[in-house]
Image (cartoon, helix red, strand yellow):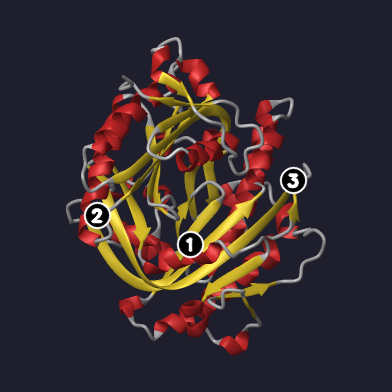
């Protein structure tokens, strides 16, 4: 069970000092990678529309795990630490030992070599259902901060700092098949090893690989996609990590970082692959802006966590992810996961969202709160490599919740599916039809409404 737990948590969390109270912030120097995969949403929809649902889900799970597993394997084999799986994206880090700046050059070279391997092996892959998978990568270097937040039975961590801000800026210049480096990242690598081109802004550097029309990827075709059978074993120093984990208070410190559906399966000795399914869920993306100063930011984030977790737990939802990327801090909450499925999950999602946004409004340090809520079918399951994977949700409705959060700031907004499912149990007057806005990647979003029980 301990070895299983380790695969759901990054090395950085396993090896940190768990004796501190929350919030706790650790500082480090290193390389940050953001890898964004395009095609997963279309893949989920295509497999989901197959006649026999279980067959489609099995094939989808296999494709996701083989593809993401190869990316994760390349990162692990090159000494990186996979921090987070955010749907169709990964966040990874190469940490300087003892924060020695002299190590940055070596780590930067490793990260670039890793990125080149990922692009060569994984970009431009045509799946068996005709959906093309592409990947784009951004790399930065510099200071990073990990903020640990949570309560006794549920903890999360968040990566912030100059390197994270820089990798976010670099990602905006990235196109499928490319690797974008910040100026500081390029300065720190061995430039003689790599060809490049300077981007228009003069501050970012691009490295692209020429690719054939489509990749055949023999490593993809020869595997059945089970987590246990993906390629060679990545180097995570399992024995060292196991030893360190045993020195914690039993397994309790790690348990609190692992999602509830996964813990339930591990407790019952069941195969995690049974968690992979297309299921009806209600998703909340909750966004806010935290103070700039580190200590104030950590305390505000801890307060936000307590508000969100308390309200979500009370209504039997699941807090799935916490991340700060692009705009402020975002919490991802899901209603309807295994063990917590209810007919009125859309209603519960709106009730939780309303209580959360009201409570966040009362915290002076937290500003620009926004929540997007959607309901629909999504892939829910464990994805990644056998040595490092996470429980995640992927799908068009998941993406739409994020788009609502961004495009309708300051309010709790929801899609028509959530409204239709919840309107009989909530006051119709508490819903207000909002002006239609184009939502990136969402062809026909349908009517969008604000839910607010405080309407005069």
What numbered label is drawn on residue 168?
1
Q: Which residue is mark 2?
A: 298
Answer few, some or many: residues within 10 Å of disc 2's Cα (few below 14, many 20 plus, some between 14 and 19): many
How many angstroms separate mark 3 from mark 1 (CA)? 26 Å
How many angstroms separate mark 2 from mark 1 (CA)? 20 Å
Image position of 229 with respect to 142: above or below:
above
Residue 310: x %, y % from top left: 26, 32
Image position of 76 with respect to 384: above or below:
below
Q: Which residue is mark 3?
A: 131
How many angstroms separate mark 3 from mark 2 (CA)? 41 Å
Give the mark nearer the N terminus: 2 vs 1. 1
Residue 323 shows up from this direction = yes
Q: Going by the picture, which residue comes out furthest to the right?
A: 213
Q: Say whether residue 50 is left or right of residue 311.
A: right
Which is in the foreground here, disc 3 or disc 2? 2
Q: Give SS at disc 1.
A: helix
> Of 57 and 450, which appears nearest the observer?
450
């Amino acid at each position: 069970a301990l070895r299983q737990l380790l695969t759901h948590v990054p090395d950085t969390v396993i090896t940190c000092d768990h004796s501190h109270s929350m919030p706790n912030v650790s500082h480090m120097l290193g390389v940050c990678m953001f890898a964004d995969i395009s095609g997963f949403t279309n893949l989920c929809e295509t497999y989901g529309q197959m006649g026999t649902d279980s067959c489609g889900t099995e094939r989808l799970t296999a494709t996701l795990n083989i593809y993401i597993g190869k990316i994760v394997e390349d990162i692990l084999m090159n000494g990186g630490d996979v921090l987070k799986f955010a749907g169709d994206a990964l966040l990874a880090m190469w940490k300087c030992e003892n924060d020695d700046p002299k190590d940055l050059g070596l780590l930067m070279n490793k990260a670039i070599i890793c990125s080149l391997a990922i692009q060569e092996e994984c970009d431009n892959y045509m799946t068996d259902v005709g959906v093309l998978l592409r990947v784009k990568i951004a790399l930065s270097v510099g200071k990073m901060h990990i903020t640990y937040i949570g309560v006794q039975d549920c903890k999360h961590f968040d990566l912030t700092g100059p390197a994270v801000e820089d990798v976010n800026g670099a990602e905006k210049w990235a196109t499928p098949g490319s690797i974008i480096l910040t100026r500081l990242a390029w300065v720190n690598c061995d430039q003689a090893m790599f060809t490049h081109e300077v981007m228009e802004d003069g501050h970012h550097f691009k490295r692209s690989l020429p690719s054939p029309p489509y990749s055949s990827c023999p490593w993809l075709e020869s595997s059945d996609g089970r987590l246990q059978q993906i390629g060679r074993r990545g180097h995570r120093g399992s024995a060292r990590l196991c030893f360190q984990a045993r020195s914690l208070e039993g397994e309790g410190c790690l348990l609190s970082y692992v999602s509830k559906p996964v813990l339930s399966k591990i407790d019952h000795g069941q195969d995690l692959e049974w968690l992979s399914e297309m299921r009806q869920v209600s998703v909340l993306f909750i966004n806010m802006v935290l103070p700039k100063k580190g200590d104030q930011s950590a305390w505000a984030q801890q307060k936000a966590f307590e508000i969100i977790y308390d309200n979500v737990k009370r209504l039997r939802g699941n807090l799935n992810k916490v991340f700060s990327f692009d705009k402020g801090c975002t919490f991802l909450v899901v209603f309807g996961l295994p063990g917590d499925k209810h007919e009125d999950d859309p209603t519960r999602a709106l009730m939780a969202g309303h209580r959360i946004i009201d409570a966040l409004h009362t915290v002076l340090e937290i500003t620009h709160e926004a929540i997007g809520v959607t309901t629909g079918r999504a892939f829910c399951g464990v994805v990644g490599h056998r040595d490092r994977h996470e429980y995640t949700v992927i799908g068009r409705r998941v993406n739409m919740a994020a788009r609502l959060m961004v495009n309708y700031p300051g309010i709790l907004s929801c899609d028509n599916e959530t409204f239709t499912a919840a309107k009989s149990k909530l006051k119709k007057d508490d819903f207000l039809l909002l002006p239609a806005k184009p939502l990136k990647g969402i062809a026909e979003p349908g009517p969008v409404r604000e839910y607010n029980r405080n309407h005069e």
